[in-house]
Image (cartoon, rainbow, N blue to C red):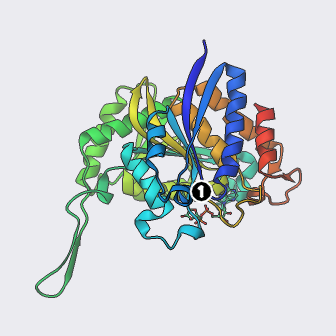
Amino acid sequence: MSRKYTLAVLPGDGIGPEVMAEALKVLDAVAARSGIEFTYNHQLVGGAAIDAVGKALPAETVAACEASDAILFGSVGGPKWEKLPPNEQPERGALLPLRKHFGLFANLRPGICYPALTSSSPIRPDLVEGGFDVLCVRELTGGMYFGQPKSRTTLPDGDIEVIDTMVYKKSEIVRIAHVAFKAAQLRRKHVTSVDKANVLTNSVLWRETMVEVAKEYPDVTLAHLYVDNAAMQLIKAPRSFDVLVTENLFGDILSDEMAMIAGSLGMLASASLGKPKGDGLYFGLFEPSGGTAPDIAGMGIANPIAQILSSALLLRFALGLEKEAASIESAVKKVIDDGLRTGDIFSGAPGTRKVNTKEIGEAVIAAL
Ligand code: NAD
């Protein structure tokens, strides 16, 4: 049976178009092997859209995303547009409105430290020996960043009082819990829920809800960590995690800690998931964790692996093509094991070779 999908392709700025080209070639190679048909709807976004039509997120781009099965995003921004008013700049003018428009409530960041790249991790070699693979699932639209009231008041005695409010509805916790448990079912079947239930009422409900939802996933084990302990365990025992799920503020901090200990920004993919489509699938936006790398843009030397792995996440979470997603991930691992390195991960170690963006794309396709 032929399976047909439409993807909105938004390469953006800087290295975006260079790494996107390799991701699409890999998707085409996967499609050719599996009887799948992808139609790419290429659209402008970010600085490229500002230059062409005066707006970081043109209406046609949003319409194309709405008409697609998923969004494959590059990255946006660069020095050329930094003097624009903040809300018109590429990131704030495009990425944030896209997240809002599509209600992208779950941010997934796999923190993979490949066995052959453990020397890139800043933590002690014996702690990362053999590599690690943690999936951080962060709730993205609730909690303290959005809760009301939020205020700053000068009091009658001249002191200043500030208020941020952490708010969660049980329904918001339930839906992120399902994302985490479903993701764990495709992995090593263990969820670590991170909270501060010894102090915060929010976290008490978070923990109760995780326990409740876990009953629907008897094949997945659930553990709880307080956030302070989780920050320590990530550094001390990263291999002890499979899926880590947490609320917005904690996730903001822990996902960056995890990215840092994994070692290389050009390797890290991410997924932002929105409306469930049924069958455990979600509409979503899939993008590298890094930015537009203006220092190397146009040189053909950027690492396309984060973009290629983002397309694998798209296949898994938006289209349910688990076998095809896993084939891309295994191919990337083989390319790394074979010693191919772009400049950002090249250390000159014996058995490794420095290559460019296109060579990585070709090697991944050859390894599929
Ligand atoms: P950056 O991630 O673009 O670059 C940081 C460093 O990492 C640079 O030295 C860069 O060369 C390197 N790097 C990043 N990705 C790489 C890759 N794939 N291959 C090889 N090296 C890579 O971060 P920055 O310099 O802080 O930001 C540059 C621009 O990107 C800014 O305009 C920023 O606003 C934007 N940005 C966009 C997004 C997004 O679209 N989601 C995210 C972060 C930053």
**Residue beneath disc 1:** 290
Q: Residue at x 31, y 37 (%)?
A: 174
Q: Residue at x 59, y 42 (%)?
A: 310
| Residue behind label 1 places its C-beta within 8 angstroms of ligand 1 | yes
Judge by depth and name the residue closer to the eye, 216 or 233: 216
Visible in this render: residue 13? yes
- Estimate the x, y position of residue 230 in percent, counting from the top left: 45, 54
Q: As drawn, which residue projects farthest toward the front?
A: 53
The kind of secondary structure element at disc 1 is loop
Q: As drawn, which residue projects farthest toward the bottom?
A: 158
- Estimate the x, y position of residue 315 in percent, counting from the top left: 57, 31
Q: Residue at x 24, y 53 (%)?
A: 167
Judge by depth and name the residue closer to the eye, 24 or 167: 24
Looking at the rendered image, the quarter that the C terminus falls into is: top right
Q: The disc labelled 1 sits on which kind of residue?
A: Gly
Q: Is residue 260 above or below residue 142?
A: below
- Estimate the x, y position of residue 265 in percent, counting from the top left: 63, 56
Looking at the rendered image, the quarter that the N terminus falls into is: top right
Q: Quadrant of ligand 1?
A: bottom right
Q: Quadrant of residue 41?
A: top right
Visible in this render: residue 127? no
Q: Quadrant of residue 63?
A: top left
Label 1: how many Cα within 10 Å (few below 14, some 14–19, many 20+): some
